[in-house]
């Protein structure tokens, strides 16, 4: 059997992550999730549990992303700690005007500077011990 490609592993890891978030949040089952995207729970389970080399067709991937409330372009970003919250924020940004967007951008820049400065202070304290 051929070795798994790194993106195959990433896909399955991300699917597991998003499934856990979704199932916990909605207090639902894999069977209910599978029904919502018109496929069997066995099919999703085999993919998610690395028991199948088969990956979903692109159409099912899009249905999965929609049901999991994650944009396909964000699905493979494994560095996000709170993907669902970020997706909800981004969705709301589309309804804002340029002035509101600029205001939010400045707030985010200010928060990032504060976090960076606090991180530098923490690192400095840690290094000086």
Image: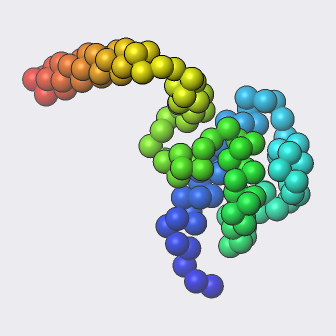
Against 85, is 79 above or below?
below
- The residue at the point 44 percent across, 15 percent down is 100
Q: Quick one: quadrant of the N terminus?
A: bottom right
Instruction: Specify whether 54 is left or right of 124.
Output: right
Against 11, is 77 above or below?
above
- The residue at the point 73 percent across, 29 percent down is 25
Instruction: Specify whether 24 is left or right of 102.
Output: right
Against 61, is 3 above or below?
below
In the image shown, does 74 or 82 lie closer to the viewer?
74
Q: Residue 55: x and y, percent?
A: 69, 67
In the image shown, does 56 or 124 lie closer to the viewer?
56
Q: Residue furthest left?
A: 128
Instruction: Specify whether 49 is left or right of 7.
Output: right
Q: Quick one: quadrant of the C terminus?
A: top left
Colouring of the image: rainbow
Q: Is residue 61 visible?
A: yes
Q: Residue 3: x and y, percent?
A: 54, 79
Q: Determine the image quadrant of residue 85.
A: top right
In the image shown, does 84 or 73 lie closer to the viewer?
73
All told, the count of numbered labels is 0
- The residue at the point 88 percent across, 57 percent down is 40
Q: Determine the image quadrant of residue 66.
A: top right
Q: Residue 118: x and y, percent?
A: 24, 17
Q: Residue furthest bottom?
A: 1
Q: Is residue 89 visible?
A: no
Q: Residue 94: x and y, percent?
A: 54, 28
Against 81, is 18 above or below?
below
In the image shown, does 95 or 7 lie closer to the viewer?
95
- The residue at the point 49 percent across, 47 percent down is 78
């Amino acid at each position: 059997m051929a070795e798994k490609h790194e993106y195959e592993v990433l896909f399955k890891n991300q699917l597991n992550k998003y499934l856990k978030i979704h199932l916990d949040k909605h207090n639902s089952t894999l069977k209910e999730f599978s029904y919502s995207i018109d496929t069997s729970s066995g099919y999703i389970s085999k993919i998610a549990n690395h028991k199948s080399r088969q990956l979903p067709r692109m159409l099912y991937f899009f249905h999965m992303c929609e049901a999991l409330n994650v944009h396909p372009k964000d699905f493979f970003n494994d560095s996000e700690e709170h993907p669902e919250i970020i997706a909800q924020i981004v969705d709301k940004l589309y309804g804002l005007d340029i002035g509101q967007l600029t205001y939010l951008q400045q707030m985010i820049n200010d928060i990032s500077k504060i976090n960076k400065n606090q991180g530098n202070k923490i690192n400095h304290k840690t290094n000086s011990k």
